[in-house]
Structures are given as structure tokens and as C-alpha cells.
Amino acid sequence: MSVQIQRRLFTVSEYNKMAEAGILPERGVELINGEIINMSPIGIRHNAMVSKLNRFLVEQVGQNALVFPQCAFMASEFTQPEPDLALAKFRSDYYVNAMLRSTDLFLLIEVSDTTFNYDNKVKRDLYAAVGVSEYWVVDLNKQKVHTYWDSQEGSYQNSRVYKKGETLYAQQLDLTLQTDWLWTW
């Protein structure tokens, strides 16, 4: 006789209650499809790129959007990912009384040092499924930016990979980025 093992999936509400009670660490985990997932440790290059992009984005979007570094959003009842950068619709209260949702987002960015396959497949599919309109993966190792936009029926309809020397354009915001700048320290 074999025993069927069942997983216990957590809701976003349960996950946040565990975090508030101190059961979960403040950083390093996220809720994906009901499962608590350990995130890869943040390395020096990853941290530097997130900081560099954060500063650039804040300067570029001004009052047209809010930039949230490493901020969780409620993707579904069972999913609360924590992308490296989120650009959301501007609100004067900075969402103090409401968790970000996919409908609030213009763009999500993941900076990938050791997690490219996860970011470029699992996260991409997850973000498309919940209606995030645009998603970028900054690949630190190959110095490329993978962009996805126009999520319909659970998948992105368009994609493009930008290499050094190209100009990247955001789809919903008046935002351009020279890719050479990304790799210049």
C-alpha cells in the first residue's frame, strides 16, 4: 500500500500572517503557487544592477509611475512574488493601505545573475498568467535584456532580446534605455 503525500498550499493571507508572526524571514522567500520558495541570495553584481536601475527609473519616470525595488505584489490568492523592480501606476498615497496587484503594474524587472532559467521561464509564465503587461529579465552573465509584453490568455504575445549597443523601449511608459549604459561601471 502506498501513501499519497499531499502538499499544503498557503494563501497570500496565511503567508503574510506567518511573516507578521516572525515565522518567515523578512527577506529571502516568496510565495509562488501556494508554495514558499527560497530565493537565491543577492550577490554584489545583482545588488549593484538593481540599485543602478532603480536610480535611473526614478529619474526617468518622475510623476508618471512609482518605482518599487524588491517589493512584493499580490499576483493571485496563492502567489505573492517579489520582483527586483516594479513600476506601478502613480498614487499619492504610495499604496500605503493596499498591496500592489498586477493591474497596478506597468512593468516588472528581474535582474538575473544565477537564476536566469527560473526568471526567464517560471517567473515569465507566472507574470503573463496574472496579466502583468510588460516584463524584463536583465541577464548579467550574457549582458542582454529579454523583454516580454502584451500578455493575453496567459502568455506574452511579443518578445525581444536586446544586446549591448541597442536602445530598449518600454511599451507603456515614455522610457528608453541605452543598453551600453547598463554594462558600464
Image: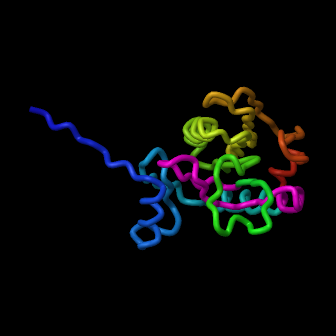
Q: Residue at x 74, y 47 (%)?
A: 107
Give 157 or 121, whichever is nearer the viewer: 157
Which colour style is shown? Answer: rainbow
Q: Is residue 57 magenta?
A: yes
Give 71 or 182, whichever is nearer the viewer: 71
Q: Residue at x 51, y 69 (%)?
A: 26
> Could you say which quadrant of the image residue 4 lies in?
top left
- Give the side of residue 17 with respect to residue 139, left or right: left
The furthest residue to the left: 1
- Give the side of residue 63 with respect to residue 68, left or right: right
Name the quarter where the N terminus is drawn. top left
Q: Position of residue 67 (x, y in %)?
A: 76, 60
Q: Is residue 34 magenta?
A: no
- Give the side of residue 3 with respect to residue 151, left or right: left
- Give the side of residue 158 with respect to residue 42, left or right: right
Identify the magenta region: 56-85
Q: How many marks?
A: 0
Question: Would you place residue 100 above or below residue 116 in this image?
Answer: below
Q: Position of residue 154 (x, y in %)?
A: 61, 31
Q: Position of residue 142 (x, y in %)?
A: 71, 40
Q: Residue at x 46, y 71 (%)?
A: 20
Name the quarter where the C terminus is drawn. bottom right
Q: Position of residue 7 (x, y in %)?
A: 31, 45
Q: Residue at x 75, y 28 (%)?
A: 158
> Could you say which quadrant of the image residue 21 lies in?
bottom left
